[in-house]
Image (spheres, rainbow, N blue to C red):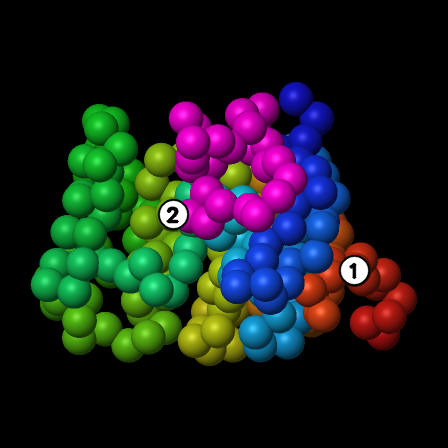
């Protein structure tokens, strides 16, 4: 397999409004693809189309060799981060990790889940319910939860939005670690400097169109 993600003439319309003009996109296996753009430009919509949480109005989406359809609606072997799909508020961080691991129906050792929490600067021994966490801590937990199933594709929608400077550096380390494992990563952010630090390719989504960004334009 050469490409993890293939979009062929994918468009999204809502009530005759063009949220996304037809897009052709290929993302190679093991690469990091960064997406930026103004608020309301359609970044989250595009990422939800790729995960299968939304259906395109036209075109086809192939993820890890599987074309998404009514029969196969969701991206296979994919971990995701969307802020609106938050953790269980009345569980601890580790409780959330255990709950997600059970959904995957895999025998994931507790020590492995604790290590994932440590990787995102969270303490597995902290029994505080997530509803008391700061927004940044909840985002870190969502990052850890997205990694539980050792996915081959990660789709992270603005994972840095509530992180402090130190935590953003750790996010870059986490992206590098996943890339070294051969994981393909799609990450959106308003922080072009962060994307330029980790992405092999970058794109700007504006006026319903995806346009490549050359690194020389960021200098």
Q: Secondary structure at mark 1?
A: strand
In the rendered image, residue 163, in percent from the top left (x then y), is placed at 45, 74
Screen quadrant of the N terminus: top right
Screen quadrant of the C terminus: bottom right
Q: Quadrant of residue 136?
A: bottom left
* Label drawn at residue 146: 2
Give me the C-alpha separation between circle 2 and circle 1. 27 Å
User: Left or right: 131 with respect to 1?
Assistant: left
Span of residues in magenta:
52-77
In the rendered image, residue 174, in percent from the top left (x then y), is placed at 50, 52
In the rendered image, residue 193, in percent from the top left (x then y), is placed at 69, 71
In the rendered image, residue 207, in percent from the top left (x then y), is placed at 72, 70
Reply above or below: 194 against 64.
Answer: below
Most foreground residue, 180 or 142: 142
User: Left or right: 82 with respect to 24?
Assistant: left
Badge 1 is on which residue?
211
Reply above or below: 59 against 19.
Answer: above
Reply above or below: 168 against 53.
Answer: below
């Amino acid at each position: 397999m050469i490409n993890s993600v293939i979009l062929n003439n994918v468009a999204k319309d809502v009530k005759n409004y063009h949220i996304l003009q037809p897009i052709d996109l290929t993302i190679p296996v093991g690469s990091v693809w960064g997406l930026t753009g103004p608020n309301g430009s359609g970044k989250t919509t595009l990422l939800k189309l790729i995960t299968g949480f939304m259906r395109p109005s036209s075109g086809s989406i192939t993820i890890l060799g599987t074309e998404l359809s009514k029969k196969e609606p969701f991206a296979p072997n994919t971990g995701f981060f969307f802020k609106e799909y938050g953790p269980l508020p009345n569980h601890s961080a580790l409780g959330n990790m255990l709950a997600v691991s059970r959904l995957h129906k895999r025998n994931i050792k507790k020590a492995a889940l604790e290590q994932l929490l440590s990787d995102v600067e969270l303490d597995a021994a902290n029994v505080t319910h997530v509803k008391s966490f700061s927004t940044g801590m909840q985002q870190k937990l969502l990052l850890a939860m997205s990694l539980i199933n050792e996915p081959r594709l990660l789709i992270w929608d603005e994972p840095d939005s509530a992180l402090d400077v130190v935590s953003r550096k750790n996010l870059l380390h986490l992206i590098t670690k996943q890339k070294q494992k051969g994981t393909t990563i799609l990450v959106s952010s308003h922080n072009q400097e962060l994307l330029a630090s980790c992405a092999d390719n970058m794109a700007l989504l504006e006026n319903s169109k995806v346009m490549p960004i050359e690194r020389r334009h960021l200098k």
